[in-house]
Image (cartoon, rainbow, N blue to C red):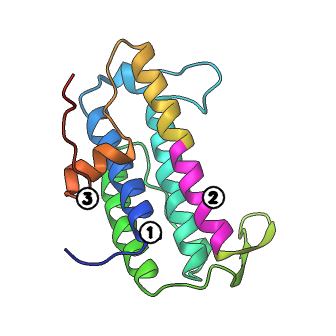
Amino acid sequence: MARTSALEAAFAHHVWATITLIDACEALSSEQRQYEVPGTRGPIVETLAHLVDSDTWDLAIIEDRDLAAVQDAGPDLGMIRGVMSKNGAGWSSFLSRAPDADEMITEIDPTDGFRRVASIGMRLAGTLDHGSDHRSQISTALTTLGITPPKLDVMTFGLEIGRVEETPGTS
């Protein structure tokens, strides 16, 4: 088994959990995809698109790409899934270079000039936090619809990739 950093493992879970949730939403009707729970970001499909678009934006900032060229995934779940898969490869490539968590990088929004300077470590933590928050909101919406959401927790991911082993207890 290849050696990975703790951060690479965290982002592998982030990408897996997001794609797993996208795949679960493929079975929803168009009406269900538009379902919205008060107190969450918005309809399921819009929240998925927002999560993935933000992930794309975060990766572009960290890679110092032209933010004006960043494209939105749109409301199609196949497109959203494809973009997240591409992001997964991008995160893996970036993190394999062992970035300096204290390196400061600048974000300038090309639409309004908003500027933020933050460390790579803060940016990475923000990406993981943002993804977890919105996956939870979508899972809440699914539950409210009477649909059991997929298990997205880290231990389920670990079992799936062979990095966690479980043995039933005796009682």
- Left or right: residue 144 versus residue 64 is left
Question: Does label 2 or label 3 sit earlier along the sequence?
Answer: 2
Numbered disc in front, either 2 or 3? 3
What secondary structure is marked by label 2?
helix
Residue in view at x 38 percent, y 41 percent: 153
- For disc 3, the marked residue is 163
What secondary structure is marked by label 1?
helix
Residue in view at x 34 percent, y 72 percent: 89
- For disc 2, the marked residue is 126
Give the residue type at disc 1: Ala
Q: Quadrant of residue 117?
A: bottom right
CA neighbours of label 1 inside 10 A, class few (<14), some (14 to 19), many (20+):
few
- Left or right: residue 144 versus residue 19 is right
Give the residue type at disc 3: Arg
CA neighbours of label 3 inside 10 A, class few (<14), some (14 to 19), many (20+):
few
Q: CA distance from mark 1 to mark 3?
A: 12 Å
Residue 15, compared with residue 124, is above or below; it is above
Question: Does label 2 or label 1 sit earlier along the sequence?
Answer: 1
Q: What is the quadrant of the C terminus in the image?
A: top left
Residue in view at x 32 percent, y 35 percent: 151
Give the residue type at disc 2: Gly
Magenta-tinted stretch? 121-132
Q: CA distance from mark 2 to mark 3?
A: 25 Å
Q: Main secondary structure of the magenta part?
A: helix
Question: Does label 1 or label 3 sit earlier along the sequence?
Answer: 1
Q: Is residue 109 magenta?
A: no
CA neighbours of label 2 inside 10 A, class few (<14), some (14 to 19), many (20+):
some
Residue in view at x 61 percent, y 74 percent: 61
Numbered badge on residue 170:
none
- For disc 1, the marked residue is 6
Of 144 and 162, the residue lying toward us: 162
